Structures are given as structure tokens and as C-alpha cells.
Image: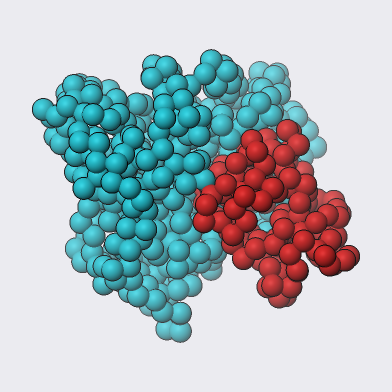
Chain colours: A red, B cyan
Amino acid sequence: MGRTVRGTALVAYDGFSARYDLDRIAGTFSRPTHKLAGQSYIDKILILDTAKGGVASAWMLHEMKSRGVAPRALVFNSVNPILVQGAALADLPMLAGFDEEITKAIPFAAEVEVNPELGILEIISER
Amino acid sequence: MNLTEEERDICAGKFGPVPQRALKHQTAVGTFFGANDFVPVTQAHIMADTESLGEAGVSWLEELAAAAEGQRGVRIPTITDPRGTDFAKAKFLGQTSAMLSLEQRAIDAFVKLGVVMTNTCINYQTIQAPARNEHVAYGDTGVVIYSNSICGARSNFEGGPSALAAGLTGRTPRYGFHLPEKRSGTLYVHVEFTPVSLNEWGALGGAIGRIAGNYWNVPVIEGIEGAPGSDQLKHFGAAMASFGSVALFHLVGLTPEASRLADVAKPDLPKFRVTNADVHALQDSYRSDDRVDVVVFSAPQLSLYEMRALAELCRGREFAVPLLAVTSPQVKPDADRLGYTRDIEDAGGTVLSGMCFYQSYAREIAEANGWKRLATNSAKMVNILGGYGYRPMLASMEACVDAAESGRLA
């Protein structure tokens, strides 16, 4: 879903919920137990395991994008309806459902290209 | 997706731009999940607190609401989840006029769209529970898991924009839990502990949610003794959905699709066990202090029976720290009439209506009031509030009320 984008990958085998995990004012992961706690997600390509938590992300991605504090794209091993609905409203590129565990396949901070139309995630360069 | 003639007309704009936009959004989501077609739905339930919407979301709603009358209304009963405030108690919460103004704008837009402002996440206890096999488009995850599992209705998690779209078109893409084949169990959990208190039911749901860990997983559960009631199952399901993004579970011999294990489970499902120690380990993992700044009962909103139980515990007490009890606008008048509100507030507590604590600018009201250490009997809420800067602690209703009086959680 969405257009092709390039950016720096923020990778973790952990869940994602805009309400549970983020300080959406500061643009950082704020839940203390999240593996990306303290990291800025702004303009990053988030590569995470799956969606967690409630339905608020469906609005919040749209709201975050309007203020320029959104990730550039979302990539998951598996995704729930809320994040797909949220990405559709926010016009945010999203990709999920790979042949391998994508959180293991992509090195942290690699430069990657996400092509949702073709369903391809390509490593451009590693840090 | 295969579209009916009516859906093609909606797409072509024959009914105006509002349903056209709604169906376009739904088609994008349905296409992502490989839906073949749409399924008619009878009810929609919208989660849309203004902390989530922000200025951008409210402006988006206002744009829809500005369409010509006759071209902007919902087609089916469409109701709302808790709002971001109780206007009568906003000053007490420390909410700003900007928050209230945004809230009012959202309400005005929803009303123009024909949405019924029920402001509740316990509509299955207060408005109208869905029937078995009824296809619905519900928002709040606690509402979805209860409706799917306990009522046998059919819904996916529908975020606010998608639930509103379903209200505007009267349908939703047929994928996920609308399909019979997606409702079979994917893991088997044997529970070796039957909870008593609501916090234990929530902690058990949370423990199973952590095991399931994925929207597409459907736990099949055995080992519960007796027959839990609506409030127990409410906390159980809400926590499972919160900790694991789970939308459907089966309790063998109790829930409608699982008369027998074989109805919902193949013999080779992965097997798990949850013990008393697991449930209490989850609860104890949140115990970071013995002092509390605030006690909150919310998430889900309290039923009349929970309000009654809380009122009995509050009678004759004098609280040292704030105690907040959050219920629905449908329960609140009865709680007032029956004296429950008076019992809670005479002790120094505050009864709030039509909102939910974590959907009401939780970070900002914490900063405004100096609230950090929070005691609650809601497992769902302790899972959420860590990200908002709180140190939430899970305990029984009795222990929480004691903490409100002494300032310490025993």
C-alpha cells in the first residue's frame, strides 16, 4: 500500500502501537519496555514484528503525518487491520507478509527501499 | 474486489462525495487483505477521541460534515466510543480550553454525519449487544473481542476512519473475522486458575494475549471453572485484546461457537498452559511502588454492577488521593438515581461519564495534576499507560479503594 520510498531502517522484533509505544509530540518511542525506547522514529522506515494494542493508530498516523512527526514507511512481519486502515488514511507506505522474518533479514540502520506495489524491500546499503 | 451495482454507483459518486470517499478507503483496505467483496453490516461503532484525531483528524471530519444534507448521513446505526472528556469535569482533570474546543468541533461534525453520540465502550452492556452471526463494524478492541467471542457476532478491529466509512456505506470489506474459516482456533490454552476478582480476570486475559501476540491468532481456552459473568469476561477480553491485539477467543463449553472443543480446534494446535503463578507474575510486574498519586477505575467503563460494588467500598471513607470512576452516559443516571455516585463522591472520589481515562489526554492531565503512580483494577489500562509516562499498578478494587484512603497500595 502506498508509493515507493527510501530511508534508514529502524529494526526491532517488537510490536507497534502509536498510542501505547510513542511520544507523538517528541517523535520518539516512549514505552520503557519497547526495544526502541528513546529512539526517534521521525522519517525512519520502521521494521517491526506486528501491530499491538488498540484502534487509535488508525487516526494517529494521519495526525502524526500532518505535523511532520511520522515514520516514512511501516514494514511488519504481519499486520492487523488497524495499521492498514491508518496507513490508508495517512497515505503512508506499508508492506507486510514476507517469505522470511523481515526483522531478522534487515540490519539495524541499513538504508532500504520499500516498494509496496511490487511487495519488495531492498537493502541499498548497510551501516 | 467484486462490486455490486449499488457499490459501483457509490464509487461513481452517484450518492455524493462522502460515501464515495468512504468506499474508496474501504476498497484500499479490502484489497490489501484480499477481500473478494463487501458484506452488509448492521451497526458501526467509532473510536474517535480527539487526542487521537488531533487538528488534522477533526478537520478531516469537518470536511465530510460540510457536504450537502442528504449526501453525508450514515446509513446504519452508528455510535461512538468514549470521548476525550467529560465536559462537566474537564476543569478537575486539568484539560485546556483548546482540548475542549477540539472535542466540541468533533462532536458537531459527528452529529452532522448522523452519528449517535453514545460515548461508550460497553455498548454490549448498555446499548444493544449484537446477535450471533450478525456482521458489524466495531471500533474499540474490547468491544470487538467481546462481540466476536461472547456474542458470536462478526467484526474486525475497525479503526475510527473505517468504522465511520462502514456507517456511511452500510458495509465493510469481507476479510478476517467476517469469514467462518478465520474463526477457528489457532492455539490451545489450558488455564489452571479460575480468577475471582476483575483484576485477576484482566491479568489472565493479558497473559493469554501475550501468548497469542497477534491479531490473526484465535486462542481456544479450557480449564475455566464455572460460568463467568459479563463484567469478568469484559475485563478478560479487553486485556487479551490490549496485550495481544487479539479479536476473538473461544471458551470451550461457554462461548457460542465452542460447545465442544472439536467445534473450534483441530487436534494439532500448539498447546500452552497458564497458571496462577503466571497471572500473578504479570500483575506483580507492574508493582513499582507502594505509594499512589491517583486511583482510577476505567477501561472499560464501569457497568452498573461495578459502580454498585465500588459505591459499597467507598461508603464512609475519606480519600487522601483522588479516586476517579469512569462510566458510560447510560449507566451514570442510574448510578446517580441509586445513590452510587453520592457514595463515591462523598468519600472524595469523582465519577466521570462518557470518557475513558487513557483516551482523555492522559499525558497532559498527568502533568497538570502531578499524577504518576496510578493504581487501577484494569489490566488493559496498566498495559497502556506506561507509554504515557505513568507508573501504573494493578490491584483489586478493594485494594485500590484502600490505597485512595491511605495513599499506599498494600
Residue A2 visible in the snapshot = yes
Q: Quadrant of residue B53?
A: top right
User: Up-down: is B219 above or below B314?
Assistant: below
- Residue drawn at x 67%, y 22% as measured from the top left: B62
Q: What is the total number of numbered labels drawn onto the structure image?
A: 0
Q: Residue B192 at what x, y percent from top left? A: 26, 72
- Residue drawn at x 26%, y 67% as measured from the top left: B276
Residue B121 visible in the snapshot = no
Q: Residue B2 at what x, y percent from top left? A: 73, 55
Q: Given the current orientation, which residue lies at the most extreme left position?
A: B316
B305 lies left or right of A101: left
Q: Residue B378 at what x, y percent from top left? A: 34, 46
B351 lies left or right of B181: left
Q: Residue B379 at what x, y percent from top left? A: 36, 50
- Residue drawn at x 35%, y 75% as measured from the top left: B273
- Residue drawn at x 50%, y 34% as measured from the top left: B363
A36 lies left or right of B123: right
Q: Given the current orientation, which residue lies at the most extreme bottom position?
A: B268
In depth, the one of B94 and B182 nearer the eye is B94
**Figure quadrant of the N terminus of chain B:** bottom right
